[in-house]
């Protein structure tokens, strides 16, 4: 155990603020996210058991201690859910901004009336319409994580 962790040898419990380094991979080994990635470059911080992260991740940290490492797999239903075919929508091509040519695989941010933005992926482009998928980009995928607890602030 690291010296600086001696006074914090408590196990993580619901409500604790937790800091973890993590790497997320698909079953084929492809890394889809990491706390070392240039977009993040710092540990993930969240309140354990509060629903700020996906359910399977939340459950995995309970009981861990500073310096502890763990590998675990989260099935799609406990991550971003299964793919819902009803979330694929055809929209008129004219509804898109004219400054960019739509391409399959392109991500869009759709503005909702409440100001929230929802990610959508273009799955088909025709002369008149585009098909967008409102499922989360990680929906339908099992996720593998390797995490290390680097900080705990008990409640």
Image: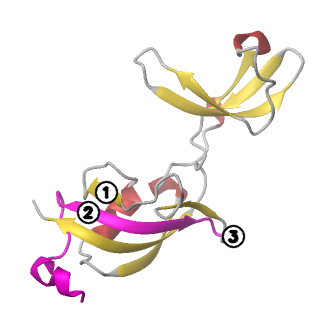
Residue most extreme to the top: 94
- The residue shown at (40%, 60%) is 42
Q: Are marks 1 and 3 in contact (CB under 8 Å)?
A: no
Q: Residues within 10 Å of mark 2 (few under 14, many from 20)?
A: many
103 displayed left or right of 55: right
Query: Between residues 19 and 77, which one lies in front from this camera angle?
Result: 19
Whole-angstrom CA distance, mark 1 to mark 3, is 27 Å
Q: Which residue is mark 1?
A: 45
Residue where numbered disc 3 is placed:
28
Pinpoint residue 34: horizontal percent, then vertical percent. Answer: 51, 62
- Residue depth check, mark 1 versus mark 3: number of the one nearer the observer: 1
- Dot 2 falls on a residue whose secondary structure is strand
Quadrant occupied by the C terminus: bottom left
- For this rendering, which residue is in front, 142 or 8? 8
Q: Position of residue 17 (x, y in %)?
A: 21, 59
Examine the image and state in which quarter residue 110 appears: top right
Residue at point 40%, 68% (across, down): 21
Residue marked by disc 2 = 18
Upstream in sequence: badge 1 or badge 3? 3
Q: Which residues are magenta?
A: 1-28
Which quadrant of the structure image shows residue 61? bottom left
Scheme of image coloration: secondary structure
134 or 30, which is in the foreground? Answer: 30
Dot 1 crowding, Cα within 10 Å, few <14, some 14–19, many 20+: some
The answer to whether the residue labelled 1 contacts the one labelled 2, judged by CB atoms less than 8 Å apart, is yes
Q: Residue 18: x, y in percent?
A: 26, 63
């Amino acid at each position: 155990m690291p010296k600086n962790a001696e006074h914090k040898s408590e196990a993580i419990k619901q409500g604790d603020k937790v800091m973890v380094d993590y790497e997320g991979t698909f079953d084929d080994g492809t890394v889809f996210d990491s706390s070392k990635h240039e977009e993040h470059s710092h540990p993930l911080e969240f309140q354990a058991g509060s629903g700020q992260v996906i359910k399977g991740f939340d459950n995995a940290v309970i009981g861990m201690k500073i310096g502890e490492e763990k590998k675990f797999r989260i099935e799609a239903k406990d991550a971003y859910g299964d793919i819902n075919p009803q979330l694929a929508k055809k929209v008129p091509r004219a509804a898109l901004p004219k400054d960019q040519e739509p391409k399959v695989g392109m991500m869009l941010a759709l503005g909702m009336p409440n100001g929230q933005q929802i990610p959508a992926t273009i799955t088909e482009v025709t002369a008149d319409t585009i098909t967008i998928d409102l499922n989360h980009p990680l929906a339908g995928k099992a996720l593998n994580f390797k995490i290390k607890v680097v900080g705990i602030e008990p409640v």
